[in-house]
Image (cartoon, rainbow, N blue to C red):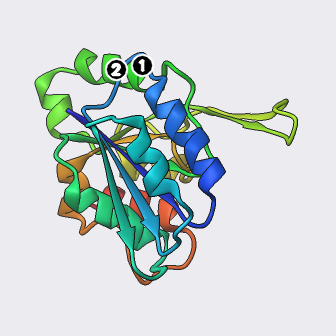
Amino acid sequence: MVSAILTTYQRCELAKRALQSILAQNFLPAEIIIVEDGSNTGLEEWIASLGRSEIKYIRHEHNRGLPVARNTGLKQAKGKLIAYLDDDDEWLPTRLEEQIKHYYALDLNERASLACIQVGCMVVDDRGQPVAIGLPKNQGNLKQSIMTIGASTPSSCFLFVRDALMAVGGFDEDMISGIDHDIWMKLAKA
């Protein structure tokens, strides 16, 4: 049901740490797709050494940018729900479990109009000490929420409905930055 998509570029050790946080989830995703965007860091060999059949590795020959890497994972994903993780982030062990509980707490009509479920995030310094907490702000009708309080789009915090992402064409591959904010606005408009 859940596909985790980890994108990375030239940061093998960070990608390993990020992947370990996916594998440490209380609720494991059905598949994990890793997209290495044009680098060749030895990550593929390390992943193969894990012997985990649920992990699929994809490598772009050349660096094509984060939105392309995310869309590559999206196109390969089989899950109904998509959870992205950037290589410099990591998930706490209950991240997916809490989002899945929330998903199943919704009635069928609410699920039919759902685009994503957001969790909070903790920003830590180089020593792992918390420096900020980001709590979800947008809820309910996304368009109305953004018009009222603005968009809150921290990376690696969303559990997207795959069909909603596909309906808006995925991430804008021409953008260099601001892709999280952009997808949020596209989903709100839709």
Q: Which residue is mark 1?
A: 98
Q: Say if residue 88 shows up in the picture.
A: no
What is the C-alpha distance between the residues marked 1 and 2? 6 Å
For residue 23, the mark is none
**Amino acid type, residue under disc 2 in the picture:** His
Q: Quadrant of the C terminus?
A: bottom left
Q: Nearer the viewer, mark 1 or mark 2?
A: 1
Q: Residue at x 16, y 46 (%)?
A: 78
Q: Residue at x 56, y 53 (%)?
A: 150
Query: Looking at this view, is 184 or 174 the one in front?
Result: 174
Q: Quadrant of the N terminus?
A: top left
* Image spot of residue 52 (x, y percent): 33, 34
Horizontal side of residue 183 vs 149, given as left or right: left
Q: Quadrant of residue 137?
A: top right
Local secondary structure at mark 1: helix
Local secondary structure at mark 2: helix
Q: Residue at x 57, y 73 (%)?
A: 177
**Amino acid type, residue under disc 1 in the picture:** Glu
Callout 1–callout 2 Cβ contact below 8 Å: yes
- Residue 21 higher or lower than 78, as above or below: above
- Residue 84 higher or lower than 106, as above or below: below
Q: Which residue is mark 2?
A: 102
Query: Looking at this view, is 160 or 74 the one in front?
Result: 74
